Image (cartoon, rainbow, N blue to C red):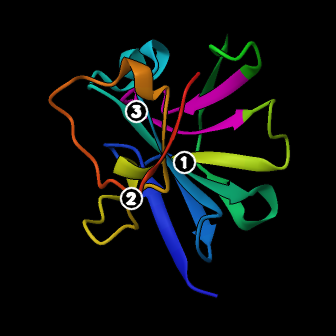
Amino acid sequence: MSERVAQCCCGRLRAVCSGSPDKVSICHCNECRRRTGSAFGIAAFYPRDRVRIEGADKTFRRDSDSGFAVLFHFCPECGSSVCWEPSRKPDMIGVAVGAFADPTYPMPDQSVSDELRHDWIAFPENMARRRS
């Protein structure tokens, strides 16, 4: 099974992921925007047993728009968030797609909180869209 490695800016925190993600989502909710400092966040969801977190991390727990808590793992040195544990899906780990730094990474399967998407962001017509 192939591995992909997501890491923080300084390389001290890594998420080693085996195989392909079960789902890749782009999210336009305000919390994902704040976490990334961008117009959206992109997450790859892997089964927990196929993700190995390496290195020191700090965690931050917050509620999501859906009301379920999320535990974020970020590097205590550079501050990059690399992965998170969504209580809504306890068997999965979300990994920040940008942390893979791989332009060939699979395109998102769905656009979440699509009603909050900036008007200037366009996606393929066949992409699934989900409201909050």
Disc 3 versus disc 2: distance between alpha carbons? 12 Å
| Residue at the disc numbered 1 | 95
| Residue at the disc numbered 2 | 100
Secondary structure beneath label 3: loop
Mark 1, Cα crowd under 10 Å, few <14 / some 14-19 / many 20+, is: many
Reply above or below: 32 against 24: above
Reply above or below: 126 against 28: below
**Residue shown at the point (85%, 40%) measured from the top left:** 90
The amino acid beneath tag 1 is: Val
Disc 3 versus disc 1: distance between alpha carbons? 12 Å
Front in this rendered view, residue 128 or 33: 128
Residue 128 drawn in magenta: no
Q: In the figure, is residue 21 to the left or right of 85? A: left
Q: Tell me, yes or no, whether the two marked residues, 1 and 2, touch with CB atoms within 8 Å.
A: yes
* Lower position in the chain sequence, tag 3 or tag 2: 3
Front in this rendered view, residue 115 or 70: 115
Front in this rendered view, residue 14 or 35: 35
| Residue at the disc numbered 3 | 80
Mark 2, Cα crowd under 10 Å, few <14 / some 14-19 / many 20+, is: many
Magenta part of the protein: which range? 70-85
